[in-house]
Image (tube, helix red, strand yellow):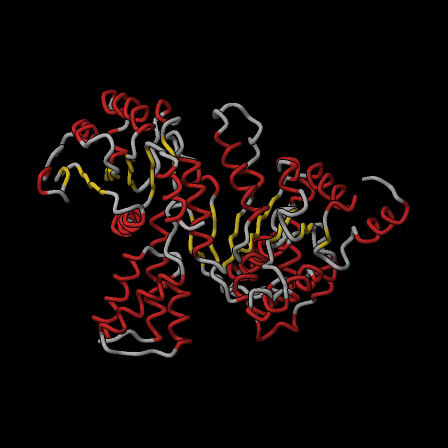
């Protein structure tokens, strides 16, 4: 259902007070006016704190700098006169006892009158006493068709034309921006080059990065890593490569649904975050990083509003990769009562979206502590697959050493004994191998020479891997994976034989 249809339904159902959180005042007011015309030209009154009511000469300036008068004006209109009252930035006055009380009184009165109060504000701020009378209605960012219409209007105004392919690329790059931002960046393109060019996609992407930074919820993350930069994890790589074309139109015509996402569970430093970056690069999709901690705000309803904003923004930018690092830490307190249920509500909104989303947002979530994850997260339907990323085996350690040394010392890679390095570093994760090489470089640099295999082995002897310091946690993870609860990311993992043995005999982990 479109915003206009849903808004019209609310008007017909006589929802007294409707709260629309959006920074796009001009666009939402145009949509409201359109609905008002559909309903036999229902009158629309617009108020703001500085100018009062503006669009009726008889009431020009009424309620200026007086939010209580703005509400009293509703009662001045005849009872049977159908009207919509748009109150801009009215969220700032909802904590005032007189304003709050007046709204509650009006909500009872308007149940029998064809009048509706619409609060338009950039964010949701609802005091507890108004929660029952306010209805929040989300206003979506512009759809591709709306962006294309605006682009064609600008092209016509500048008497130029572009190939349909270029127009589609510009529209796709602009998705996720407000219409005002799109107009601004296209005007900048025209001002700098005299016309809209195919190269202006980069200008739009920069505006998009700026927009995402301002939300302080999602981060536009650069991804230069490649699938080939990951050592080992052959099963996971094969799974990803097989789905490389799943976001194309050809896949839709074939009948394939959009891939939903991956949950990567495993030991710290084993390449889970690297995998998220490599997926975005390999699939040529934007990578958005979500810090779940940023979803939580101090005001009532703010956390839920930020969660909805995050979902709206991610879907508007689709197709994209949404990377959620260490999701286990974010939702570990989901059953706690200490935050009045805020974590539970945010988790509920997020988990419902994971299960029901139709948009091409591929979620890559990583977790170190499977015990902290709510059981609902692990149910089928949330993710396409759950992979266990364990410690690299000897063959994988050799591949990891080779990858790093090929980058650090490409000219004399053959001088390093890769087999020996892999053999002498049991229980080392990929991150610990990288740290070992850094330490070896310090040894060589301090003696004014290049580092050698012996330096790497000396550095390795001084590092105590996490597999020894967090033995119980890692053992639990390995047992959980061995019980067949997740798919193995590595083809020749040390757990493979054990899993096959357990699955073959019907043992329970």
Q: Nearer the viewer, residue 400 or 132?
A: 132
Report whether 129 appears left or right of 243: left
Q: Nearer the viewer, residue 190 or 256?
A: 256
**Location of residue 14 in the rendering, given as x and y in whole percent from the top left corner:** 36, 34
Q: Nearer the viewer, residue 492 or 89?
A: 89
State the residue at coordinates (29%, 30%): 113
**Location of residue 118 in the rendering, given as x and y in whole percent from the top left corner:** 29, 38
State the residue at coordinates (39%, 63%): 145
**Location of residue 439 in the rendering, given as x and y in whole percent from the top left corner:** 56, 55
**Location of residue 266 in the rendering, given as x and y in whole percent from the top left corner:** 66, 47
Of the 4 image quadrants, the one containing the C terminus is top right
In this rendering, does residue 40 appear at all?
A: yes
Report whether 174 appears left or right of 381: left
- Label count reads 0
Asked if 142 appears above or below 42 in the picture, the reply is below
Report whether 236 appears left or right of 202: right
In the rendered image, the residue lying farthest to the right is 505
Q: Quadrant of residue 47?
A: top left
Asked if 293 appears above or below 260 in the picture, the reply is above
State the residue at coordinates (57%, 54%): 435
In this rendering, does residue 408 appear at all?
A: no
State the residue at coordinates (61%, 55%): 271
Q: Quadrant of residue 430?
A: bottom right
Report whether 213 appears left or right of 47: right
Q: Quadrant of residue 464?
A: top right
């Amino acid at each position: 259902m479109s915003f206009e249809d849903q808004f019209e339904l609310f008007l017909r159902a006589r929802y007294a007070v409707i709260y629309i959180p959006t920074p796009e005042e001009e666009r939402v007011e145009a949509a409201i006016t359109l609905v008002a015309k559909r309903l036999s030209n229902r009158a629309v009154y617009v108020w703001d704190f500085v100018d009062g009511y503006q669009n009726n000469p008889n009431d020009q300036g009424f309620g200026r700098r007086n939010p209580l008068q703005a509400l009293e004006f509703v009662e001045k209109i005849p009872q049977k006169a159908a009207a919509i009252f748009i109150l801009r930035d009215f969220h700032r006055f909802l904590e005032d006892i007189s304003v709050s009380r007046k709204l509650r009184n009006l909500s009872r009165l308007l149940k029998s009158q064809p009048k509706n109060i619409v609060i338009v504000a950039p964010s949701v701020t609802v005091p507890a006493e108004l929660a029952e009378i306010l209805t929040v209605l989300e206003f979506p960012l512009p759809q591709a068709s709306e962006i294309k219409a605006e682009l064609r209007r600008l092209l016509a105004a500048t008497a130029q034309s572009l190939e349909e392919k270029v127009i589609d690329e510009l529209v796709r790059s602009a998705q996720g921006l407000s219409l005002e931002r799109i107009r601004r960046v296209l005007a900048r393109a025209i001002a700098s080059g005299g016309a809209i060019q195919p190269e202006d996609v980069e200008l739009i992407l920069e505006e998009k990065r700026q927009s995402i930074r301002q939300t302080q919820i999602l981060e536009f993350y650069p991804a230069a890593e490649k699938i080939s930069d990951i050592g080992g994890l052959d099963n996971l790589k094969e799974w990803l490569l097989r789905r490389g074309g799943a976001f194309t139109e050809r896949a839709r015509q074939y009948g394939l649904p959009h891939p939903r996402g991956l949950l990567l569970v495993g030991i710290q430093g084993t390449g889970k975050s690297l995998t998220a970056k490599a997926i975005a690069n390999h699939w040529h999709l934007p990578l958005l990083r979500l810090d779940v901690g940023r979803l939580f705000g101090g005001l009532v309803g703010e956390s839920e509003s930020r969660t909805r904003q995050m979902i709206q923004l991610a879907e508007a930018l689709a197709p994209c990769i949404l990377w959620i690092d260490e999701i286990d830490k974010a939702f570990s307190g989901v059953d706690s009562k200490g935050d009045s249920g805020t974590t539970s509500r945010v988790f509920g909104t997020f988990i419902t979206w994971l299960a029901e989303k139709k948009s091409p947002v591929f979620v890559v979530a990583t977790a170190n502590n499977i015990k902290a994850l709510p059981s609902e997260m692990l149910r089928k339907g949330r993710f396409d697959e759950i992979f266990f990323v364990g410690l690299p085996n000897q063959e994988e350690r050799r591949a990891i050493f080779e990858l790093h040394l090929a980058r650090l010392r490409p000219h004399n890679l053959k001088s390093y004994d890769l087999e020996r390095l892999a053999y002498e570093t049991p229980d080392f994760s990929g991150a610990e191998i990288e740290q070992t090489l850094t330490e070896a470089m310090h040894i060589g640099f301090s003696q004014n020479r290049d580092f050698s295999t012996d330096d790497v082995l000396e550095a390795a002897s001084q590092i105590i891997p996490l597999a020894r310091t967090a033995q119980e946690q890692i053992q639990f993870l390995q047992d959980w994976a061995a019980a067949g609860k997740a798919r193995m990311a590595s083809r020749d993992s040390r757990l493979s034989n054990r899993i096959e043995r357990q699955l073959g005999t019907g043992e329970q982990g």
